[in-house]
Amino acid sequence: MTFQDSLCKLLSAFLLCFVIAGCSDSTSSSTVNQKDFNKIYPPANGGTMIDAMTGEPSGLIAMIAGESAASAIASNIFNSLLKYDRNLDLTGELAESWEISKDKKTITFHLKPGLKWADNQSLTSEDVLFTWQKVTDENTRTPYGSDFKLVVKAETPDPSTFKVTYDAPYAPALDTWAGLHILPKHLLKDQDINTTAFSRKPVGSHYYQLVSWKNGQYLKLTRNPNATQGQARIDSLLSRIIPDKAAQFLELSADNIDSMGLNPIQYARIFPARPELNKNIALYKELGNNYTYLGFNLKRKPFDDIRVRQAINYAIDKQEIIDGVLLGLGEPVASPYKPGTRWSNPALKSYPYDPAKAKALLKDAGFIDSNGDGILEKDGKPFAFEILTNQNKEREMTGVLIQRRLREIGIDANIRVLEWASFLGRFIKPKEFDVVVLGWSLSLDPDQYSIWHSSQQAPGQFNFISYSNPRVDKLLEAGRLELDPDKRMKIYHEFSKILLEDSPIVYLSAGYGLSAIHKRVQGISNPAPPAGIGYNTYEWYIPKVYARHEINEQ
Amino acid sequence: MLKYLLKRFIWMIPLLIGISLISFFIMHLAPGDITTSEASFNPKASEESRQKLRELYNLDKPIIVQYGLWLKRIATLDFGTSFASHQRPVFWQTKDKDGNITLGMIQEALPITLLINVLSLLLIIGVALPLGVISALNQNQLPDRGITLFVFIGFAIPGFWLALMLMYWTGVQHSWMPISGLQSLGHENLSWFGQTLDTLKHLALPVFISGITGLAGISLFVRNGMLEVLHQDYITTARSKGLNEQRVVYGHALRNALLPLITIFGLSIPGLIGGSVIAESIFAIPGMGKLFYDAVLMRDFPVIMGILTIGAILTLLGNLLADIAYAWADPRVRRGVVQ
């Protein structure tokens, strides 16, 4: 029996351990190194930066892979003709300059001299032409071809000149060329781009090249000696795939990774409460890339009535959503453009929270609480509808706040949360919804023809709320033809103004992009410029004394 | 015996077809397809190009035709290529004309999941057997109560919470264990021994978590089996013969109490290839659970069907193995099979 007794003791000791481990709110973290990371050193080359991402790229040819994990890695490997600079203005990347013809239909790109691929072959306009041919090829499995199919003629008069001609002036053209990664013709010309092994062994021209890819574990990039944009300071980038945010956070606390994206709770609650984390890790906040909105199905009654839409807009407290859901880490928006950029109309303000006005508008529209149950009625029918959203915690919480505010003015709203593919396939595509809570990106190019133009309402197209306003249609068409930035700006300021008045959607909030980066990584712009902290990653550096492998040796 | 086996094998073919047919239809009952993924909800992606993708993947054809195409491929043991993961082969590696080898998705995920599950099964058996025996021998006494309490706590504790707590305790507060992942970053530079040790260290927590939550079932099963056997007449006989207690308990009682466990292990064979989505996500382990979950979310039909088919085959084989093992262990069953 002694064996059994000791086993019992062992078990209870074991149990005790759990309880202690579970209950101790010990702040006595014993991070291995107690080094002071607050000293700033001059820029130096070398080091490895480790970050974490939740998803794994399916491949590194961005036009085919499509997901954000793929573009995040691929944009370190491949160049585009143009890029956005720190203030979100277009500037040349592979192209040294570009000019637009008198009739505004032809764009001529002049490539920088002496461009090379990582394998020492020279990068010429032939490669650009080849990439264009691939993205527009019927057999290429890309959803992004349509912008490039507007090009009626693409030519390469000489190895450093690439010329495209459109049927009609197309203002978003430059933006599309800033998003197309140029691929090497000499490696891909005999390959099927949909299945090629190249997508897992890419050869590019940007700062880094891929050295290893362990499925489900990590991707490692190292400096490309032939980089077309000069040399980056950090030697290698390692991206670990850790699907769970909480696990990422533990890895960051244990100093196994250098950077990760945070959610508002981690940023606003956990970090302030844990001083020992702030010693080694710096937090960054930048303008996010998308906004959340409440969209009406304008084909359904009573949302076809502008008074009803405006009433709901007045009834929703946007600041409450920003404070409650994003913990204050967001901004209200009044147009579908990044606040503070050229396209966003500074004169526009989002609808203030004004329940009295909302009630008055609804009364105007014929909604009266005739039976005294607290819910408004019209023609004997109570004003009730369903708010649909997908499985996204922030959108769900937003829905709940909206539900309460609507109840206060006498609208009975239910919330229904769906898995994404069902949401899209069963409700959005056949337009079987009353109201949705969703997000759109705050695009860098102002053209939003596919979202708001009345011709874009067929199933599967993006104007699924069926917005139709002839004035907006005209402006959107004019904006596509106008290449002069100032005139274009006026067009889109006018467009946003009408959109805000019409209130086909209620702008709710634009959350900040939040990230935590270890202080060993220096040279990061703080506060972030409009383009976000990532615009100059090639200038980031890790001082020798802080480099990771040296720490491990101590 | 041989005839019996042959019969069982032949029966598996219509069963498999039935299973795959039902799986295929249920899979298509869920709305959406690969073109309704979150990434495709991008104004830069046009509906025409998505329609083109649907045609390329035959998703515009009636479901029965799609099933026929799938069946035709599977008849040649071709599990196809993934829609979502750049046409990676679903099951086994392929080699292109330049000699580049692309590993299959199941080929990569299965060994990892299998290793974790086999290790945790061994852990469960290794711990649950003695626990169950001790419980039975001390029925309703302190050790029995303590063990029952312990296994139920293990059963009831949320795995993800325990996982995070242990990761924090062993990885952040003390650097005893790696937190997540399958290998350390310098893994390939280690010696053979170092690599094994490194992998085992990474697997320790996931195996422990899945073991602790699975302990309750088996240990209570052993306990109750033992109790039942200990009250049989032949145990009384053995004791009255004057056999020592060790012999009675381990030689006579335990052997008989373990018989029903064979069924349980037979049933757990399909479970061996199914990973846990939550554990794999938290520990960042690229196993079968995450593979299947992501495939379902992406509506990556070839991958879903591939995993379901292989799962079905293994389940049927597991049942067969359990029956054979039963026949081997229990003469009464053996006689029934041969006749």
Image (cartoon, rainbow, N blue to C red):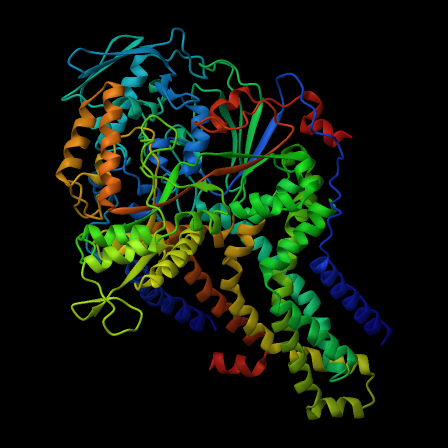
B95 on left or right of A266: left
In the depicted view, which residue is nearer to us: A415 or A322? A322
User: Which of the 4 quarters of the picture holds residue A113?
Assistant: top left
Q: Is residue A172 visible?
A: no
Q: Is residue A545 above or below residue B128?
A: above
Please say if A317 is above or below B158.
above
Residue B89 or residue A489, whichever sits in front: A489
Please report the residue visible at 43 percent of the width from the left and 45 percent of the height from the top: B92
Q: Position of residue B239 (x, y in %)?
A: 79, 89
Q: Residue A199 location in percent, x, y?
A: 40, 31
**Figure quadrant of the N terminus of chain A:** bottom right
Query: Residue at (29%, 68%) from the top-left corner?
Result: A375
Residue A240 in the image, given as x and y percentages of width and height: 55, 38
Q: Is residue B171 visible?
A: yes
Location of residue A13 in the rendering, given as x and y in whole percent from the top left corner: 79, 65
Q: Is residue A260 left or right of residue A542?
A: left
Q: Quadrant of residue A509?
A: top left
**A484 or B173, which lies in front?**
A484
Q: Residue at (65%, 73%) from the top-left corner? A: B152
* Position of B14 relative to A326 (above/below): below
Q: Is residue A86 left or right of residue A167?
A: right
Quarter of the rendering occupied by the C terminus of chain A: top right
Q: How many marks?
A: 0
